[in-house]
Image (cartoon, rainbow, N blue to C red):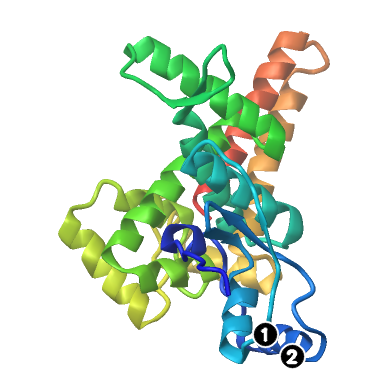
């Protein structure tokens, strides 16, 4: 059997299968063999981790195919593209993948010969321009805004920092079992190493409690009761409030708004919605 290297960084990119799904995959391989080849990069496994585990466990033969990449960043981007194309991802996992893609893409610069090289130290203006260009390109690719991609890079960085403190905590976050929001993750980046370790320990123990922040706690208890009595979730209420405000602004133009004024009003509304999204 081929000597295959398991890379934990690549493996950690893939969401774990639940017990029921894993059992179905195992049953199918036991009955039909390994129908799909494992994908390797210089003997490093980059696709087919569950199939490899099952085949080695039961001594079932499998085939492999090799792919050529210029760097680990290119491999990472390929894995992300593979996952996005084949799975129904949670919003948090998709955000994590977009953020990782952005961070990996920033490290890759193509020279005139088409070869990939790691970026050298640049001026602040050049680095900022490159970041905006990368964010805009990925925003178009993933059909989101540029600001969303930039925020996703912070989410990805926070999850990776958390993973350094506890791989189990990172797995719980990516599986959705941690109950942590994107905003809570981004707040981790401003915390100390001790703060991060404490959060990691809490996540290992179970889902985090959702605490109301000062901004989200503006409504009184009676208003909250009215919302739930009306069958509206807090998210529905927030969206309705932003939408009503936007429509009120449009009505205030009385049909005399210029195209520029309409565009600015719409852009402001989109920004408010994106801010709401970042808090979920």
- Viewer-proximal residue among 81 and 194: 81
The image shows residue 31 at horizontal and vertical percentages of 80, 91
Quadrant position of residue 83: bottom right
Q: Which residue is mark 2?
A: 30
- Viewer-proximal residue among 58 and 154: 58
Query: Decide: marks 1, 2 in contact (CB < 8 A)?
Result: yes
The image shows residue 63 at horizontal and vertical percentages of 71, 68
Q: CA distance from mark 1 to mark 2?
A: 8 Å
Q: Quadrant of the N terminus?
A: bottom right
The image shows residue 33 at horizontal and vertical percentages of 77, 83
Whether residue 216 is visible: yes
- Secondary structure under badge 2? helix
| Identity of the residue drawn at 57% across and 79% down | 53
Whether residue 151 is visible: no
Number of marks in the rendered image: 2
Question: First in sequence: mark 1 or mark 2?
Answer: 2
Compared with 214, 197 (above or below) is below
212 to the left or right of 259: left
Quadrant position of residue 93: bottom right
| Identity of the residue drawn at 39% across and 47% down | 157
- Secondary structure under badge 1? loop
Compared with 51, 170 (above or below) is above
Label 2 environment density (alpha carbons within 10 Å; few <14, some 14–19, many ≥20): some
The image shows residue 277 at horizontal and vertical percentages of 57, 48
Identify the disc placed on residue 73. none
| Identity of the residue drawn at 35% across and 62% down | 163
Q: Which residue is mark 1?
A: 60
29 to the left or right of 48: right
């Amino acid at each position: 059997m081929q000597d295959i290297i398991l890379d934990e960084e690549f493996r950690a990119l893939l969401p774990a299968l639940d017990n029921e799904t894993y059992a179905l995959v195992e049953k199918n391989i036991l009955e039909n063999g390994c129908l799909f080849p494992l994908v390797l990069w210089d003997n490093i496994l980059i696709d087919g981790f569950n199939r490899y585990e099952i085949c080695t466990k039961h001594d079932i033969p499998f085939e492999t195919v090799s792919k050529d990449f210029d760097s680990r960043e290119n491999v990472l981007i390929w894995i992300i593209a593979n996952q996005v194309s084949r799975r129904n991802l949670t919003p948090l996992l998709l955000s994590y993948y977009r953020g990782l893609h952005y961070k990996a893409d920033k490290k890759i610069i193509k020279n005139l010969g088409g070869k990939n090289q790691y970026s050298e130290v640049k001026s602040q203006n050049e680095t900022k321009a490159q970041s905006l260009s990368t964010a805009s390109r990925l925003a178009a690719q993933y059909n989101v805004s540029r600001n969303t991609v930039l925020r996703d890079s912070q989410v990805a960085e926070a999850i990776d920092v958390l993973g350094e403190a506890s791989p189990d905590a990172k797995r719980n976050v990516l599986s959705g079992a941690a109950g942590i929001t994107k905003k809570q993750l981004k707040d981790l980046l401003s915390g100390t190493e001790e703060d991060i370790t404490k959060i990691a320990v809490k996540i290992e123990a179970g889902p985090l409690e959702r605490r109301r922040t000062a901004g989200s706690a503006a409504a009184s208890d009676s208003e909250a009761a009215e919302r739930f009595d009306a069958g509206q979730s807090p998210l529905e209420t927030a969206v309705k409030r932003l939408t009503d405000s936007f429509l009120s602004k449009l009505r205030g133009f009385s049909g005399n708004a210029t195209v520029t004024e309409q565009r600015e009003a719409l852009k402001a509304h989109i920004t408010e919605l994106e801010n709401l999204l970042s808090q979920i």
